[in-house]
Image (cartoon, rainbow, N blue to C red):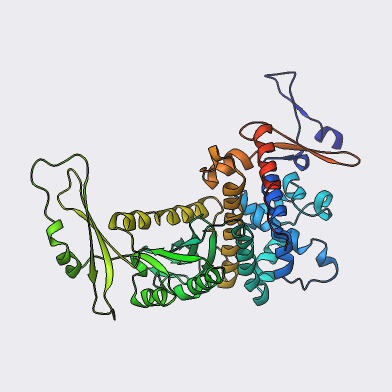
Amino acid sequence: MGERQNEPFQLSFNTSLKVDFQGSRVTSDGGLILVRELDEQLRFGDLVAEHLSDARRGKNTQLPLVDLFRQSIYSRVAGYEDANDAERLSQDPAFRLIGSEKVWDRGVALTSRLQTFETEMLAEEENFAGLARINRALIGKVEALDSAQRVVLDMDSTEIPVYGEQENSAYNGHFESTCYHPLLLFNREGDCLAAKLRPGNVHSAEDWEELLLPEIEQQQKLGKEVVFRADAAFAKPEIYAALEERGVKYAIRIPANDSLERDIAELLTRPAGRPSYKPVVWYKSFLYQAASWKTARRVVAKVEFHFGELFPRVGFIVTNLETDSRAVVRFYNKRGTAEQWIKEGKQAVKMTRLSCHRFRSNEVRLWLSLMAYNLGNLWRRLVLPKRIDNWSLTSLQQRLMKTGGRLVKHARYYWLLLAESHLTRRLFRAMVGRIAALPVATG
């Protein structure tokens, strides 16, 4: 009876076809091994071992800490939402091969083990602090390759809706939802440098100094010029003063008010004659001092008249940049890419999956998702050929990571036989070559 249950299936529509189930030897995530190769080149495992401590003893240590950490990160890189998928992935060849030799044959952690690792072990005070250090050290290894003397920082907040009784979740009137309200700091390459999970009802700029000032200090120690961009939620005089005190250039949008509009009154009248199908755009730069400011600052106004619209579109940016008004606006508008990176974090690596009751456990999960995002972003910008380096992380998952493969074990080697579709032999060879050529320091 047992033999009959394990026999392959033969279907009537094609008598030459037989179907069998060999899940432990077949993977749908074969492209992950390229991310693992980049991880090895960046010495990601060394960073994990350096900044996390393992207090387990005895049989609890059968799965090494670095393997558990990689399993948590790579499941998110591949688009799996949380530890519930670990049961199915425990025997997946790709997830076995990205770990150490100990898990090649036995398999990776099951759901209960991975859940305990994420919500208890990583939630310990020392290990939780280590997550931010691992993330920053990983980006630091790549920054060492960049000779640019100018660093652009983008800060933004976002909404992560919750649907249970999570600690510190609260109703946010702006988003009109019960949520968490994390704060994120990016560089212009899209790497997330720092983050903080916050209750849902805090102001968008709350705790800005905790993330921004240490990053400015670190970059200036390296001799870099720092420039900061943010939307109108960060239009606060204490932020301007802190940046000016540290010699940081900035461009921050400020909300319109009657005083600002009086300063550009001559620009608010629609041009005479037949309306142009092409938008009419005017700029003006002037000094402005709000009642709460101790000094006057430069404000750049942009006024746009669009065909079919009764009123002009008006925007104001406070800045200490010395470039012309058009260049200031163009520089500020690139801040919109930070919103795209946040969107990728939500869609590709499931950053919104914060369903634990304890706030600390959800903080850990946010960091794991952000490190998965960063690893995917580093793969995109360091490894992909130029013709596809603008793909979104979701496209990379669907076209490259989701590559079918079969694992064959011989006496001395493991063979992973990949299906050739979007991920071709030529593309695979090019990416492996680019990874090997990265001059990343080993320290």
Q: Is residue 1 visible?
A: no
> On the image, which quarter does residue 353 sit in?
bottom right
Above or below: residue 5 compared with residue 81: above
Q: Is residue 407 left or right of residue 326?
A: right
Q: Position of residue 149 (x, y in %)?
A: 51, 61
Quarter of the picture containing the N terminus is top right
**In this view of the protein, which residue sits in the foreground, 260 or 75?**
260
Residue 324 position by quadrant:
bottom left
Can residue 191 be seen at all in this image of the molecule? yes
Q: Nearer the viewer, residue 132 or 103?
A: 132
* 315 left or right, relative to 183: left
Q: Residue at point 79% right, 51% down?
A: 107
Q: Image quarter for residue 329? A: bottom left
Q: Is residue 355 above or below residue 423?
A: below
- Residue sitting farthest toward the right: 411
Q: Is residue 302 left or right of residue 176?
A: left
Q: Nearer the viewer, residue 211 or 86?
A: 211
Q: Nearer the viewer, residue 10 or 418?
A: 418
Residue 266 placement (x, y as % from top left): 12, 59
Look at 14% across and 50% down and name the residue there.
310
Residue 4 horizontal/vertical position (percent) = 83, 32
Image coordinates for residue 14, horizontal then vertical, percent: 70, 19
